[in-house]
Image: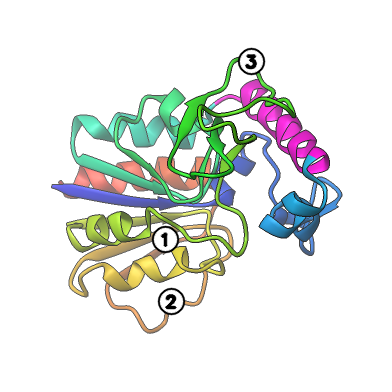
Amino acid sequence: MKLVVLTGAGISAESGLKTFRDADGLWEGYNVYDVATPEAWERNPELVQQFYNERRQQVMDAKPNRAHEILAELESDFDVEIITQNIDDLHERAGSTKVTHLHGIITRSQSDAKPNLTYPIKGSEIKMGELCELGSQLRPHVVWFGEAVPMIEVAATICQQADLFVLIGTSLAVYPAAGLIDFVPSAVKKYIVDPRTPDVNRYKNVITIEDGAVNGMAKLKAILLNEK
């Protein structure tokens, strides 16, 4: 049975990772348009590089939480496919084996000239002057605001194949990721784990668990194994 899971900022927040969702468009004190757009990179690449180097170190220092671990454990009973809006690698470090990163992953770099040319990062920093094989500056492998989301079609296909669907820690406010629930078949049960349930009134077969990711996933694991 294919269990498709869409995760957002709420699951990483319980590992101590803050995102711009937390406070009025600010991310660690920066306006997201100053550090997370192609225009910001053109305007001040040193600032953007420094910002993501700091975020990368935070990711490396963070640990997967119990919600990440439960998703990995569910692979014993389900064909689990995770689609994440998060740029950290906490799902992989918890043991999940099928993870699609919609917005890239901060532990890799990419060519400024050719986005699909990516590399693992040695340590926690990308340095200015560090170039790809084409001679172009390396930047974070992250989808910025205003850029295309290359994995969205892959994710939509995964959602179409779901036998069960779970939404964890996302407000369904960031598109195109928020539209993925529209690809889940109407008859499929859709579990939502979030302290504040997003507006999903137009969807059928929705079951809400109004709790944080860690507590909510403990409850959901019991439900899923009981119904299996």
Residue identified by numbered label 3: 123
Q: Quadrant of residue 177?
A: bottom left
Q: Residue at x 20, y 70 (%)?
A: 185
Residue identified by numbered label 2: 200
**Could you tell me if the residues under marks 3 and 2 are in contact, i.e. CB atoms within 8 Å?**
no
In magenta segment, residue 185 = no
Q: Residue at x 53, y 45 (%)?
A: 86
Three-letter code for the amino acid on which mark 1 is drawn = Ile
In this picture, which residue range is highlighted in magenta?
A: 46-63
Q: Residue furthest bottom?
A: 202
> Which is more foreground, mark 3 or mark 2?
3
* Mark closest to the chain's N terminus, 1 or 2: 1
**Judging from the image, what secondary structure is the residue with disc 2 in?**
loop
Three-letter code for the amino acid on which mark 2 is drawn = Val
- Front residue of 67 and 109: 109
Q: Quadrant of residue 17?
A: top right
**Judging from the image, what secondary structure is the residue with disc 3 in?**
loop
**Judging from the image, what secondary structure is the residue with disc 1 in?**
strand
Q: CA distance from mark 3 to mark 2?
A: 41 Å
Reply above or below: 77 against 180.
above
Task: Indicate the colouring scheme.
Answer: rainbow
Residue identified by numbered label 1: 192
**Could you tell me if the residues under marks 1 and 2 are in contact, i.e. CB atoms within 8 Å?**
yes
Q: Residue furthest front?
A: 135
Magenta: main secondary structure equals helix
